[in-house]
């Protein structure tokens, strides 16, 4: 990436981790294109010269195309993408319905696919490299008995796999692909889950803030030598039994 002001796209930015990531990049002087289905109504951000909001389901290719076009027309480049939009819910494997699977694959997989294809095309045209960071989960490598999230893991595990594939495919062009794998993060996703229980899900007995995840995303975005990496920010949750 060069010295000109950088532009980053953040999906799922109306609350939680995505809002923290968008704010972290704004604080660092990036231009930000922030998307979620209802980001303009959410009140999370007011548009400014440095920030554009794009409403829509990122799992729809037309919305992804609009996000890409907005970044290029408003700011003239795409230097980084953060694929944060995602849904996640626990139930027994045999209880997941066809609708559940469709919702998970639309948001978590199609929500990654179309906008990443658009960003990579633009990065290739710019010939300045770039960064794509996803948000997965510590549960991909360290499942916990009693936290039944098998079907969401099809998507999160797939995202870690595609991150490594793309890191190889685009290494020569210096387009880097990494993911941050959180444990439990204090966001509206967990509004109905008791904190005392959530604290038992890591050996450190802690819950991350969105800002702690955002700083890992910024770190990977700006680390010119890191690609194909999964950075666990999880109080040690990925590190075996405790
Ligand atoms: N919180 C945790 O403990 C935790 C742990 C591991 C991984 N993660 C992952 O981290 C990411 C963010 O989680 P979070 O806890 O911040 O979730 P959250 O509080 O539920 O926020 C999700 C965000 O994504 C947006 N969104 C949902 N579906 C969308 C779609 N189809 N298109 C565009 N935007 C969409 C939502 O806004 P709208 O409603 O306006 O669309 C919202 O801004 C997810 O990928 C999640 O799986 C979270």
Image (cartoon, grey):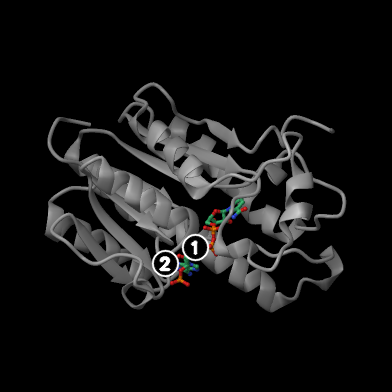
Q: Secondary structure at mark 1?
A: helix
Residue 44 lies in quadrant: bottom left
Residue 126 or 178: which is nearer the viewer? 178
Quadrant placement of the N terminus: top left
2 vs 97, left or right, is left
Label 2 CB sits under 8 Å from any ligand 1 atom: yes
Classed neighbour count for the residue bearing mark 2: other residues with Cα under 10 Å, few (<14), some (14–19), many (≥20): many
Q: Residue at x 29, y 69 (%)?
A: 54
Residue labelled with disc 1: 110
At 27% across and 44% down in the image, what residue appears? 27
Residue that appears at 65% across and 49% down: 184
| Residue closest to the far top | 225
Res. 58 mark: 2
Q: Is mark 1 within 8 Å of ligand 1?
A: no
Q: Position of residue 189 (x, y in %)?
A: 60, 63
Determine whether 43 is above or below 161 in the image. below
Q: Residue at x 52, y 66 (%)?
A: 107
Secondary structure beneath label 2: loop
Question: Which percent across, then down, holds residue 179?
Answer: 51, 40
Residue 37: image tag: none
Left/right of residue 95 with respect to residue 238 in the rendered view:
right
Above or below for 202 versus 11: above
Label 2 or label 1, whichever comes before in sequence order: 2
């Amino acid at each position: 990436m060069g010295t000109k002001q950088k532009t980053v796209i953040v999906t799922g930015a109306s609350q939680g981790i995505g809002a923290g990531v968008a704010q972290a990049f704004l604080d660092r002087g990036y231009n930000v294109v922030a998307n979620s289905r209802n980001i303009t109504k959410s009140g999370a951000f007011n548009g400014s010269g440095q920030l554009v909001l794009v409403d829509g389901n990122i799992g729809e290719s037309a919305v992804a195309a609009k996000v890409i076009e907005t970044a290029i027309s408003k700011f003239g480049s795409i230097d980084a993408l953060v694929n944060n939009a995602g849904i996640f819910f626990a139930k027994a494997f045999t209880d997941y319905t066809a609708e559940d699977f469709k919702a998970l694959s639309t948001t978590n997989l199609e929500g990654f696919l179309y906008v990443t294809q658009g960003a990579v095309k633009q990065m290739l045209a710019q010939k300045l490299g770039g960064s794509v960071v996803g948000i997965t989960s510590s549960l991909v490598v360290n499942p916990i008995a009693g936290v039944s999230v098998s079907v969401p893991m099809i998507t999160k595990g797939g995202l870690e796999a595609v991150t490594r594939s793309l890191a190889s495919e685009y290494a020569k062009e210096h387009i880097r692909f990494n993911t941050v794998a959180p444990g439990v993060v204090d966001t509206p996703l967990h509004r109905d889950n008791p904190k005392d229980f959530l604290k038992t899900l890591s050996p450190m007995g802690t819950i991350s803030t969105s800002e702690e995840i955002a700083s890992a995303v910024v770190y990977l975005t700006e680390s010119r030598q890191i690609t194909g990496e999964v950075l666990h920010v999880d109080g040690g949750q990925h590190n075996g039994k405790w």
